Amino acid sequence: MWKLWSSWPKGDSVRIALIGHGPIAAHVAAHLPEGVRLTGALCRPGREQAAHAVLGVPVAQALEGLSERPDLLVDCAGHSGLRAHGVAALGAGVEVLTVSVGALADVVFCAELEAAARAGGTRLCLASGAIGALDALAAAAMGTGLQVTYTGRKPPQGWRGSRAENVLDLDALTAPATHFTGTARAAAQAYPKNANVAAAVALAGAGLDATRAELIADPGATANIHEIAAEGAFGRFRFQIEGLPLPGNPRSSALTALSLLAALRQRGAAIRLSL
Ligand SMILES: NC(=O)C1=CN([C@@H]2O[C@H](COP(=O)(O)OP(=O)(O)OC[C@H]3O[C@@H](n4cnc5c(N)ncnc54)[C@H](OP(=O)(O)O)[C@@H]3O)[C@@H](O)[C@H]2O)C=CC1
Ligand SMILES: O=C([O-])CC(=O)C(=O)O
């Protein structure tokens, strides 16, 4: 069946390298669309063997250490991966696709990324990740009066290793408990492994300081539930997604890895969605 973004033009292929070898990276590597070739990966010092075992490609600690220069560097590692490699890659003219959207809440780092992309004549692409409806938010933001609230709800184990543990006894919860309310910027900075979605919603729509965020640990939740409530001159909408986690990390929704695959597939299409 013909699809809008069916495949890369025959004979063309894109070389990608990954940052990270966690559940998101492993899923991407195992399901690359036709025409996309994984040529390398970047890891932290001492993690070469572990990364090679998961991905089966040459591994280095920096882009210059890879034998093949990628056309695109795909950050699947989280904020520290983008911080370690984003500016250098963009400055060297290598496009970067990232899941670490919340890292852009740091204004200084965001400006460094932007300057590097301009200097390198390339761009930083933000994955839609675990959320949807960013197209509607971006359109709504072109009108007036946009107000957006994002609510992130996960089972208690989805908040392990996050600041929620300072506020709540996750093992003892018997009812939903809010452990953060504030701006999307503050959420993204306080929860680097859990609130990239808050940043994506904000960057697409009303901005990091005007978007309200609430984060909830819910012992009754059986999925990672993300909700957007938006209203403005355009009208209003509500969007909710119940994302199942990837095997290997209850924090990360499977849709995140799928969004990277969708972005890779779209990149090679002559006819594509416009967002
Ligand atoms: N945009 C979105 O909607 C979403 C974004 N995310 C982001 O994706 C990140 C990754 O998720 P997931 O795969 O589940 O997480 P894991 O934390 O399980 O995996 C992260 C991987 O990245 C590696 N890594 C960490 N820092 C670096 C670095 N500086 N350089 C190279 N590799 C590095 C780790 O390796 P090692 O520890 O061995 O060094 C590990 O292999 C999350 O932390 C979160 O920030 C997640 C879900 C949704
Ligand atoms: O995967 C998810 O459900 C969301 C997540 O962790 C994030 O926004 O960083």
Image (tube, helix red, strand yellow):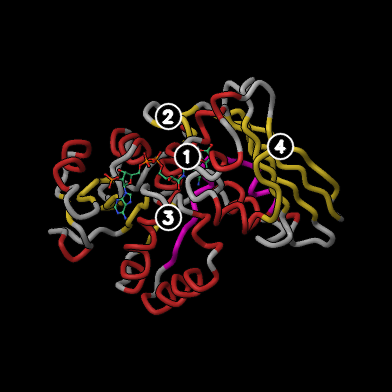
- Nearest to the observer: residue 40 or residue 13: 40
| Mark 2 lies on residue | 246
Residue type beneath disc 1: Thr
Residue at x 24%, y 53% (from the top left corner) = 44
Give neighbour class at mark 2: few <14, some 14-19, many 20+ (Cα, 10 Å): some
- Give the mark count: 4
Question: Which portion, as a residue range, is magenta?
Answer: 123-137
Label whose residue precedes the other's in the sequence (3 or 4):
3
Label whose residue precedes the other's in the sequence (3 or 1):
3
Label 3 and label 1: CA atoms lie apart by 15 Å
Q: Of helix, strand and loop, which one carries label 3?
A: helix
Ligand 1 closer than 8 Å to label 1 CB: yes
Between disc 2 and disc 1, the foreground one is 2
Q: Position of residue 275 (x, y in %)?
A: 59, 53
Ligand 1 closer than 8 Å to label 2 CB: yes
Q: Of helix, strand and loop, which one carries label 2?
A: strand
- Nearest to the observer: residue 17 or residue 108: 108
Residue type beneath disc 4: Phe
Between disc 3 and disc 2, the foreground one is 3
Label 2 and label 1: CA atoms lie apart by 9 Å
Residue type beneath disc 3: His
Q: Of helix, strand and loop, which one carries label 1?
A: helix
Between disc 3 and disc 4, the foreground one is 3
Residue type beneath disc 2: Leu
| Mark 4 lies on residue | 239
| Mark 1 lies on residue | 256
Between disc 4 and disc 2, the foreground one is 2
The answer, for residue 267, to whether it is visible in the render is yes
